[in-house]
Amino acid sequence: MKAAIVKRYGSPDVVSVGEAPKPAPTAGEVLVRVRAASVNRTDCGELRGHPVFMRLFSGLLRPRRKIFGLDFAGEVEAVGSAIVAFKPGDRVFGMCPTKSNGAQAEYVCVPERAVAAMPAGARFDEAVVCEGAFYADAVLRRIALEPGDEILIYGASGAIGTALVQLAKAAGGEVTAVVATRHLELARFLGADRTVDYTAEDFTRIGERFDFVVDAVGKTTYFRCRKLLKPDGIYAATDLGPWGQNVMLAMWSAITRSNRVVIPTPMRIGGFPAYLRGHMEAGRFRAIIDRKYPLAAIADAYRYVETGQKVGIVVIDVAAADDGAS
């Protein structure tokens, strides 16, 4: 099968498309013929080997897995023993565990719990959305957002940010989205109650206080945003922050029991695709697609994601001939 292969850490130049062995499902696994995949910030971090301490899990000198990619959508090709929920031909989507090869290939094997049936009427390119929503959901669960809570989302145009806006609104939150000028209409379209253009004004000086402030892109800090928090407000970050300061602050918050700064830890993948499908079918969540690349040009997709300018998701069209991904 064709796959995007990574043999060492480095820039997008080390990603090459070549032949790899087609996987076979073991007990409890589903073999999926991939129609669409994605490239996201997590993939780029894994490619670069950043942060360095993560190499304890991904491989000290070179990546343990040779094929990256978390999100996938496609058709069931075969199933392992004891699988009863899926059969060959089923349209499915989901998220790959990071301990095995990923979805930037023509085929991928994943545990049954990481797969869900495609939402009715959805295209393949609209279903490679789990990664951003997975982290967004972890944030909302960690801060325990309730109806009526006021939440400010900095960086509300990326994969995590667009997911946060939609899932926070679905939970009944009052959402303020901080984005650049060109993304104001997108934020409103997603349901934000208020938008702030950070290129036109200092969003930390808008004179309001929030129950929660979330940095969804790792480009601001708690010290800059703390004036936005109510006395018992929480700052949540999806990134380690400059010099890992968010980790240190989260540890101190835990020690002092102030709960002021948190770095949410995602739950296990199992069951999440099915949970997200419910939101998608109810119209509470939709994909925001920035660009699409064929598998042959996946290195260009990595280069674009590394610019930090992407909006929503970047799709890899693994099966260009399929009308659902083209």
Image: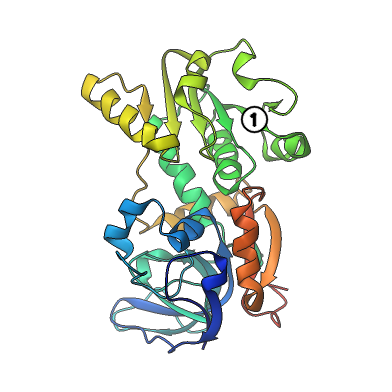
Q: Residue at x 66, y 48 (%)?
A: 309
When the figure is inspected, residue 182 is found, relative to residue 6, above or below; the finding is above
Q: Is residue 1 above or below residue 278?
A: below
Q: Is residue 222 left or right of residue 321?
A: left
Q: Is 245 in front, or is 68?
A: 245
- Residue 248, image x and y in percent? 31, 31
**Does 265 appear above or below 66?**
above
Q: Residue at left 33%, top 63%?
A: 58
Q: Which of the 4 quarters of the picture holds residue 125?
A: bottom right
Total numbered labels: 1
Q: Is residue 182 visible?
A: yes
Q: Residue furthest left?
A: 255
Q: Tell me: 132 left or right of 245.
A: right
Q: Helix, strand, or loop for circle 1?
A: strand
Q: Is residue 199 left or right of residue 298?
A: right
**Scheme of colours in the image:** rainbow
Q: Return the x and y of residue 165 as percentages of the image width and height.
A: 59, 37
Q: What's the residue at 66%, 20% (across, down)?
A: 202
Question: How crowded is the residue under tag 1: few (<14 C-alpha within 10 Å), some, or many (20+)?
Answer: many
Residue marked by disc 1: 178
Q: Position of residue 24 (x, y in %)?
A: 37, 87
Vertical comparison of 145 with 310: above or below? above
The answer to which of 45 and 289 lies nearer the viewer is: 45
In what quadrant of the picture does the C terminus appear? bottom right
Q: Quadrant of residue 126?
A: bottom right
- Which amino acid is tagged 1? Val
Residue 297: % across, % down: 66, 74
The residue closer to the viewer here, 172 or 195, is 195
Residue 211 visible from this viewpoint: no
Question: In the image shown, does 121 or 178 lie closer to the viewer?
Answer: 178
Identify the residue shown where x is 65% and y is 14%.
206
